[in-house]
Image (cartoon, rainbow, N blue to C red):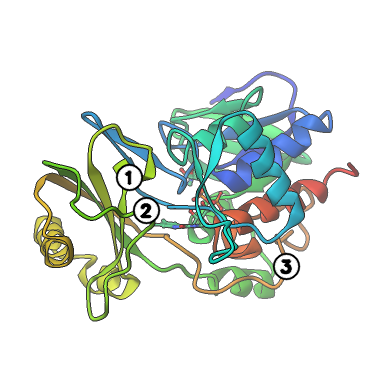
Amino acid sequence: MIIDGAIAHDHIVIGAGICGLTAARHLHDAGHSVIVLDKGRGIGGRMATRRIGDAVFDHGAQFITTRSDWFRAVLSDCQRNAHATIWYGGTDEDPYPRWRGTLGMTSIPKYLSEGLDVRTSVQVTSVSYDNELWHVHCSDGNVMTANHCILTAPVAQSLALIDAGGVVLATDDRQALEDLTYERCFAVMATLAHPLSVRLDRPLAPAAPSPVALISDNYAKGVSPVPCLTIHSTPEFALHHWDNDRTETLKMLVAATHDVLRCDIIDATIHGWKFSRPERQHSAPYLAPQGHPGLVIAGDAFGGPRVEGAALSGLAAARSFSTH
Ligand SMILES: Cc1cc2nc3c(=O)[nH]c(=O)nc-3n(C[C@H](O)[C@H](O)[C@H](O)COP(=O)(O)OP(=O)(O)OC[C@H]3O[C@@H](n4cnc5c(N)ncnc54)[C@H](O)[C@@H]3O)c2cc1C
């Protein structure tokens, strides 16, 4: 067992999605020592941008909306620093701006992470409590300790980590967490031979019945230098086909897209989001399990099933530890 330094950190945040980064940013700016761990190679979680050859795909969240003044101010700051821009909306006919990252969705989490101690490719395997400290065990054998631990993975994954660490939750807390289930989604990343003949200046939702919920043109959006589409399945289609052969599923989604756009797809890959969006929202913006001081569980299942909801949950979680 390797202990990461003799002195415990103030806070360990598990997950470098928008929730975890917002929490870490707030705590860091309030003077606390914080580390953020994420199993992914990059940061951003479901605000994911992926490059395949020359094509650039936003393959998770497509755009960001704001309801709170606080998050509007966060995005305005990103915009002033050239990390976010309005994709569409914000006009008289369509008053709500849909924001995007300038180089893709991950531009925003990358900016929020500046100056933070974020460690990627670190898979946490369990979280336990001993000697008044939280111990975060990682797959490489490293163990990090902190006074406080904020879990921001999708709830089933956070629960698995505390179960593996022998943390016993009160029955009502456990039930509340188990109730927070998620929709699934397939994301197809399709490269086109030519730009679309129709200009998609916003996501297209094919008329029902279709296995496709949304088609987004990353080229027209301004994030890809070459024409390419992100295609999201409906949650019902994803649930039904989850265990089927992925090549067959990919073919079905490509065919359904071709029916709508008659486009020339030259290459396509599929990604399954097992935890796409929460199906319901917890009654509070985070959960601090009874009898476990210093432990907080947060994420979009607590703040609302959107980027803004996840960020608001991260802010509330951080504020539970900080007076700023
Ligand atoms: C296909 C799709 C389309 C969407 N479209 C939109 C949209 O258009 N607009 C919108 O507002 N929202 C959209 N959403 C929802 C939005 O992306 C999420 O609500 C938000 O990004 C969630 O942020 P989060 O920080 O709570 O979780 P996440 O982004 O999931 O972050 C959690 C992080 O925890 C990490 N993690 C998990 N387990 C471990 C572990 N054991 N060890 C270390 N790290 C771990 C993960 O790698 C991940 O980076 C969409 C989501 C999907 C999947």
Picture residue at 65% right of the left edge, 26% below the top? 116
Q: For this view, does 157 lie left or right of residue 225? A: right
- Give the spatial CA distance, label 1 vs label 3: 38 Å
Q: Residues within 10 Å of mark 1 (few under 14, many from 20)?
A: many
Give me the disc on residue 220.
1
Between marks 3 and 2 in the image, the one whose residue lies nearer the viewer: 2
Q: Earlier in the sequence, mark 3 or mark 2?
A: 2
Q: Are the residues at dot 2 and dot 1 in contact (C-beta closer than 8 Å)?
A: yes
Tell which tag, 1 or 3, sits nearer the viewer: 1
Mark 2: is the Cβ under 8 angstroms from ligand 1? Answer: no
Q: Which residue is mark 3?
A: 284
**Snapshot quadrant of residue 83:** top right
294 left or right of 24 in image: right
| Quadrant in which the C terminus appears | top right
Q: Amino acid at mark 3?
A: Ala
Judging depth in this view, the residue of 178 and 126 nearest the camera is 178
Q: Residues within 10 Å of mark 3 (few under 14, many from 20)?
A: some
x and y percentages locating residue 55 in the rendered image: 25, 35
Give the side of residue 197 with respect to residue 105, left or right. left
Q: Is residue 195 in view?
A: yes
Q: Is residue 129 visible?
A: no
Query: As shown in the figure, which amino acid type bears the numbered disc 1?
Result: Ala
Q: Which residue is mark 2?
A: 201
Give the residue drawn at x 50%, y 34%: 107
Q: Residues within 10 Å of mark 2 (few under 14, many from 20)?
A: some
User: What is the C-alpha distance between the residues marked 3 and 2?
Assistant: 36 Å
Is mark 3 in CB contact (under 8 Å) with mark 2? no
Please state which of residues 44 and 121 is positioned toward the viewer in this rendering: 44
Q: Earlier in the sequence, mark 2 or mark 1?
A: 2
Q: Which mark is residue 43?
A: none
Q: Amino acid at mark 2?
A: Asp
Q: Quadrant of residue 226?
A: top left
